[in-house]
Image (cartoon, helix red, strand yellow):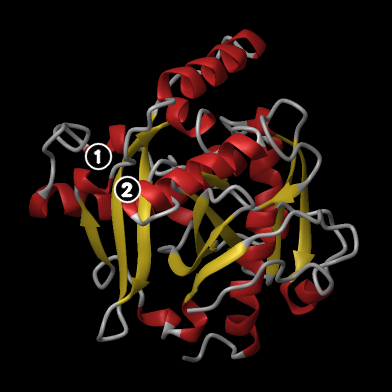
Amino acid sequence: MASAAALGQGALGECAPPEPYTLLLSCPLVRANTVTRESLRVDYDRRHDRKPHRDDDENIGRAWLAATEKNPRIFDGSKFRLHRIALDAHGDVVIELGLTGYREYLGTNRLPAAALRQLEADGQADHANPRAHLSDALGCETVLLTADDQVVLLRRSSSVATHGGLHNGPSGHPEPARCGAGVEGAGAQGAAATAAVVHELYDSVLQETHEETAVPRDALSEPQLIGCMADAVGKPDLLFLTRTSLDADGVRACYSQGPEEGWESDRLVFWPAQTLAECTLALTPVTRAAIACFLPLWDRGFRE
């Protein structure tokens, strides 16, 4: 496990945004190539949900009203909540997940700084956990590597909610609604629910990559978990490496056809993996974290 307030700022380019992040887990340091969907240990249980706070009605209600007035298209979709990610006694990655929603996320993690700090202080006082009252909705992003060793990056359009104009890899959220009946229920847990959640953690990477680049799913490899990060307000993202059998020209041809979620980006760019440490593009914090996890793998030639 490794932690850093601002890993990758200098090496990844002076144009990168200064927003700090924390690296919660770096899989290249813990047998990265062995972290598969079969070996990943997920503890999905509703006891890992956020704890209600006395000011929820005011904080969440006000934030949601402001958000919907600004953008009537948004809706309160369910998301997984990251309670904890760690290594067990055998060195295996364990992820503890609950359930949250976009409304909770806007009304907790995205509150003004003073209100956010108060939620953290109350969480520590009430539950000995500063994250207890926060949504911490779990996202995902992948380093997408072409057959000719180019890293695929998308410039975020002005239509997205955050980090418009910055570059990132294919990204999004695992969706509880895609896990089948029962996972979103109050008592959902057990082997069947856990298997469905694990499948969605990996499948969401392939789905987001296809929807944002139009690269066919059958041209994508099994995603490889390479890390986990949290941004400046504590929102976590799982970080993956995915390879495509297409070269850069092939990916460009797919993107030119108009991907399903093409509105999220306004430009497709490539950066050679060999010089990724010197990337001068403006990158999101999640992307900087993903690259920081990817570079040790690249330096070792994916041999371990």
- Whether residues under marks 1 and 2 lie with C-beta atoms below 8 angstroms apart, the answer is yes
* Residue at position x 56%, y 30% in the image: 260
Q: Residue 93: percent from the left, percent from the top?
A: 33, 73
* Residue at position x 78%, y 46% in the image: 166
User: 20 and 258: which one is in front?
Assistant: 20
Q: Is mark 2 on a helix, strand or loop?
A: helix
Q: Quadrant of the rendered structure where residue 179 is?
A: top left
Q: Seen from this angle, which residue lies furthest front?
A: 125
User: 158 and 256: which one is in front?
Assistant: 158
Q: Is 212 rendered above or below residue 22?
A: above
Q: Is 31 rendered above or below residue 221?
A: below
Q: What residue type is labelled 2?
A: Glu
Q: Measure the alpha-carbon separation of dots 1 and 2.
A: 6 Å
* Residue at position x 46%, y 29% in the image: 102
Locate residue 57 relative to residue 303 in the image: left or right. left
Q: Which mark is residue 179?
A: 1
Q: Quadrant of the rendered structure where residue 100 is?
A: top left
- Is residue 214 at all visible to an observer of this figure? no
- Please rate how many residues cluster around mark 1, counting C-alpha atoms within 10 Å: few if below 14, some from 14 to 19, many from 20: many
Q: Quadrant of the rendered structure where residue 244 is?
A: bottom right
- Is residue 140 at all visible to an observer of this figure? yes
Q: Is 63 rendered above or below residue 47?
A: above
Locate residue 116 relative to residue 1 in the image: left or right. right
Q: Earlier in the sequence, mark 1 or mark 2?
A: 1
Q: Residue 147: percent from the left, percent from the top?
A: 62, 68
Q: Which mark is residue 200?
A: 2
Q: Is mark 1 on a helix, strand or loop?
A: helix
Q: What residue type is labelled 1?
A: Cys
Q: Residue 236: percent from the left, percent from the top?
A: 50, 53
- Please rate how many residues cluster around mark 2, counting C-alpha atoms within 10 Å: few if below 14, some from 14 to 19, many from 20: many
